[in-house]
Image (cartoon, rainbow, N blue to C red):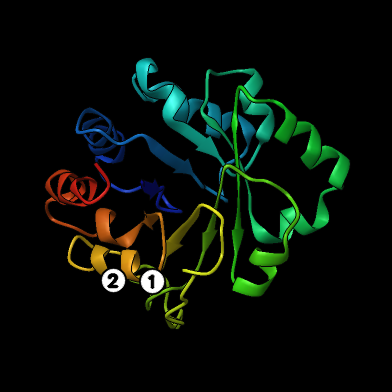
Amino acid sequence: MIVVIAPEEDIRDEIIILNQLFEAGLEYYHLRKPMKNFKEHGDYIQQINTRFHNRIVVHYHHELIDEFDLKGIHFQEQKRRDTSSRTIDTFLKNKQISVSSSFHDPKELSECTYEFNYQFLSPVFTSISKENYKGQGFDVNDIPKRIIGMGGATKDNINDFIRLGFQGVGVLGGIWNSKTPVDDLKQMLNYFN
């Protein structure tokens, strides 16, 4: 499973590249634009080919799932901690959408009682897109959950994530900083097909 995370700030030709990534087989796109408000998120989604909306997971403005046919919602670590268990349970009971969350500690992830569709754990390797975000080399082979590794993911180190027990990879800098993002995505997808 390959998850592409949106760059925090818009980049040149982002929507064009994103639609090409979807055409190439991208199934999970996490829309994480902390500087955009509700309307700007909606405007961003409207630029994407509608047949790909059901592959988008939103990190902010979860109510967008009522406006668009989206794949699901994501609870960032602090938001998960701050949100009532009743609210999270309500989303988890809705089998029509995917619900995921972020973790930075394997122990907390292992002990979490919510049954998310999948969860991110980072940083596995040193981040490409965030300064001073040092990799921890987390090994999750003994945690029986669907865990997506993040941090430093590129087309060249997918095997390292698999060896550490991850069922997928979340990638940001490895795609958006690449001169050949579509080709790189295709190579990454081969590991999980």
Which residue is more in the foreground, 105 or 179? 105
Q: Which amino acid, by three-letter code, is at mark 1? A: Leu
- Which residue appears at 36% of the width and 25% of the height? 48
What whole-number distance in Å separates the C-alpha atoms at marks 2 and 1?
6 Å
Residue 161 location (% of width, % of height): 34, 67
Does the CB distance between marks 2 and 1 fall below 8 Å? yes
Q: Is residue 157 left or right of residue 68?
A: left
Tell me the crowding category of disc 2: few under 14, some 14 to 19, or many 20 or more residues within 10 angstroms, Cα based.
some
Q: Is residue 129 left or right of residue 87?
A: left
Judge whether residue 120 can be spotted in this image. Answer: yes
Element at badge 1?
A: loop
Residue 131 location (% of width, % of height): 42, 78
- Which residue appears at 67% of the width and 60% of the height? 77
Determine which residue is flagged by label 1.
164
Which residue is more in the foreground, 142 or 159? 142
- Which residue appears at 52% of the width and 36% of the height? 57
User: Which labelled disc corresponds to residue 160?
Assistant: 2
Q: Which amino acid, by three-letter code, is at mark 2? A: Asp
Q: Hey, which quadrant is residue 130 in on the image?
A: bottom left
- Which residue appears at 36% of the width and 57% of the height? 172
Residue 16, above or below 148? above
Residue 20, above or below 101? above
Residue 97 location (% of width, % of height): 60, 27
